[in-house]
Image (cartoon, rainbow, N blue to C red):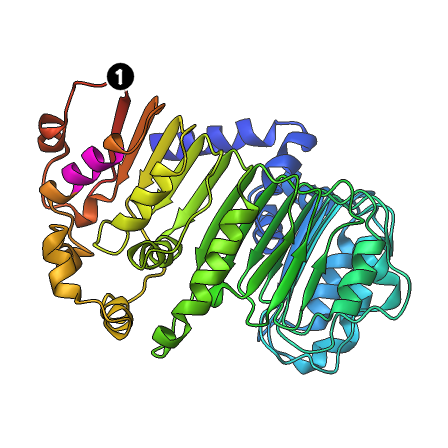
Amino acid sequence: MADDRKIEGALDLISSLPDEILQHILSFVSTKVAIRTSLLSRSWRHVWCEVPSLSLEVEKLTTAASINETLTRYTAPKTKSFQLVIKPMMMNIPYIDRWIKFAMSHSLENLSLEFPRPYYQEYKLPDFFYNSCSFKQLNITLSSYRTMVPKCTVSWTSLQKLSLSCYSLSDESMAKILSGCPVLENLTLSNCDELKLIDLSKSLRLKTLQVNCGMTATQIVAPHIHFLRLVNPQSSYTLVDVASLTEAELEISFFDSHIKTDFPQLQVKVLEMLYKLQNADKLTLGSNFIQIISLAEILGVPFPMLKIKSLTFDTKTCQYVIPGIERLLQNSPDLEKLTVRGRTRFHIPVEIPDMYLELQGLNVNKWSRAKNRASWAKHRKDAKLEHVASLVELMLKNTEKLDKMVLLLDGRYLNFKIEDLTATLSHHNNVTIVLSCTKKK
């Protein structure tokens, strides 16, 4: 009984809050959950109707009628955000335009449209969708073809942030979209496989560009951006103009069983990117990117000098990242901060670089023994104390102005205690070393 009274008291306290606060709380959950809260209290019955955000997921058992009923009861004069996720139900296609128009009629600022499966090949976004002065943020994920092909003029005059995941987005459609976004500051492109040119030369306010995957050879012309994040399969992108770039994150995401035949081309692409990044202040490189650099270093390919002051390596220790790390440090004389995050999302099977180097006439076993790295390849996953310690010493040896080094180690793959590493490190330097380790699961 006492517990029941406590619960009732807690509910009374919540119910006594102003509607504006309750609406703010409900804006963090889906509309479906927000509607269910009307069962908690009579005073809550209509609170969800004026929440300044809508999040609707059209699932297999959801009918268009129920969505329409929800929108009929919704009375907020302005909608800050609207998320519509539509799972495969062909009978819902005739209603999509109505739902989008409803959201746009409420001075919508943030819109997220997700069609996660390719069941909507017959559907095209309506012309009125491309004309809004209230949009500030758009997030569009389309798995179908020809869904986003603007035939009209695009006018998103207030849009600052745009994220597109559209497999069939063409160069013509991309150019038309960009021409209608005069104040765009942040652009993310994912899986836009048909784009051959990303020309941002007229996007004067665009400062951030993120490109994730894409199988087509694509040129990037982005003279005004300050930040670039590029995750792409087999380095399919060419940086034509990134003259204002100050920070970049680069990784190569996909490798197939025949990648050894692509290494010469990959080396050229990767080194071309480094030359374009000579004036950047901050650089983050993934494991595969570093390994391609390593192979070029092993084969004696010349490298550009860099002006970076902060460098991050997203990689675990293995024999095919060491030469690249060493060369990058030697060619970065102004480096002040170095971070190593002991993780990797994508990785080249160690056998593939072996085969490639052997095709180039290099005896891999002999090279490994000469460099004292013969056992490193066997420990891609489990990090040994001596390997991590020697990597730290190697990095210290190859830097001149370094002020701070940060090591973020993954506890799942360590077979030693972090305290043991501290004891092995040299203390005869002026570098602050920060060690951190995630918990083992």
Residue 206 makes an appearance in the image: yes
Q: Amino acid at mark 1?
A: Asn
Residue extending farthest right = 153
> Relative to residue 299, is residue 383 drawn left or right?
left
Tell me the magenta residue range. 388-395
Q: Nearer the viewer, residue 57 or 141?
A: 141
Name the quarter where the N terminus is drawn: top left
Percent across and percent down for residue 247 are 54, 39
Percent across and percent down for residue 64 are 71, 72
Q: Nearer the viewer, residue 71 or 203?
A: 203
Q: The residue tagged with tag 1: helix, strand or loop?
A: loop
Give the residue at mark 1: 430
Quadrant of the image occupied by residue 298: bottom left
**Residue 393 is covered by the magenta coloring:** yes
- Magenta: predominant secondary structure element? helix
Quadrant of the image occupied by residue 377: bottom left
Give above or below for 191 relative to 433: below
